[in-house]
């Protein structure tokens, strides 16, 4: 008898789910997942060069993409949203490194520069 695999203690970024399981967890058809991979929207890890393996983060991203498309965003729009959100996260991470803890002057300076650039 084969032991059932337990993925509950696996970290969110570890790819463990085959496409059929990822499709079930995300509520999408496996062909939709293949299309998203081809378009670069959600690109899972590859095992042996061809077998797709999805992580919990990938599943969450698939659900998010599903919400966006259900609200009327086309796939090119989804790609653009994902790129922009990644860019914002990157900028936020850089900003955290620039602003000294407890120094609100840095925050106010940053906000004022941001407002000046948009005016």
Image: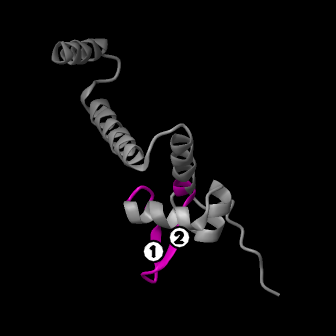
Instruction: Report helix, strand or loop for mark 2.
Output: strand
**In this picture, which residue range is highlighted in magenta?**
40-58
> Residue drawn at (50%, 73%), measured in percent from left and top?
52
Q: Earlier in the sequence, mark 1 or mark 2?
A: 1
State the residue position of label 2: 53
Q: Which of 86 and 81 is in front in this view?
A: 81
> Residue drawn at (29%, 17%), measured in percent from left and top?
107
> In this picture, is 14 found above or below 5?
above
Q: Is residue 97 left or right of residue 3?
A: left
The quadrant in which residue 100 appears is: top left
Can you name the residue that lies furthest to the right here? 1
> Residue drawn at (45%, 69%), measured in percent from left and top?
45
Q: In this view, does 62 lie to the left or right of 43?
A: right
Q: Tell me if residue 86 can be seen.
A: yes
Disc 1 versus disc 2: distance between alpha carbons?
6 Å
Indicate whether residue 41 is drawn in magenta.
yes
Residues at badges 1 and 2 in contact (C-beta under 8 Å)? yes
State the residue position of label 1: 46
């Amino acid at each position: 008898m084969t032991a059932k695999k337990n993925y509950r203690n696996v970290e969110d970024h570890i790819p463990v789910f085959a496409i059929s399981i990822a499709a079930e967890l995300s509520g999408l058809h496996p062909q939709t997942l293949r299309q998203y991979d081809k378009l670069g929207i959600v690109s899972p890890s590859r095992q042996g060069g061809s077998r797709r393996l999805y992580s919990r983060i990938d599943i969450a991203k698939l659900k998010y993409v599903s919400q966006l498309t259900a609200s009327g965003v086309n796939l090119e729009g989804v790609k653009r949203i994902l790129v922009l959100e990644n860019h914002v996260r990157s900028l936020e991470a850089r900003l955290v490194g620039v602003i000294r803890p407890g120094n609100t002057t840095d925050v106010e300076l940053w906000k004022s520069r941001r407002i000046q650039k948009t005016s």
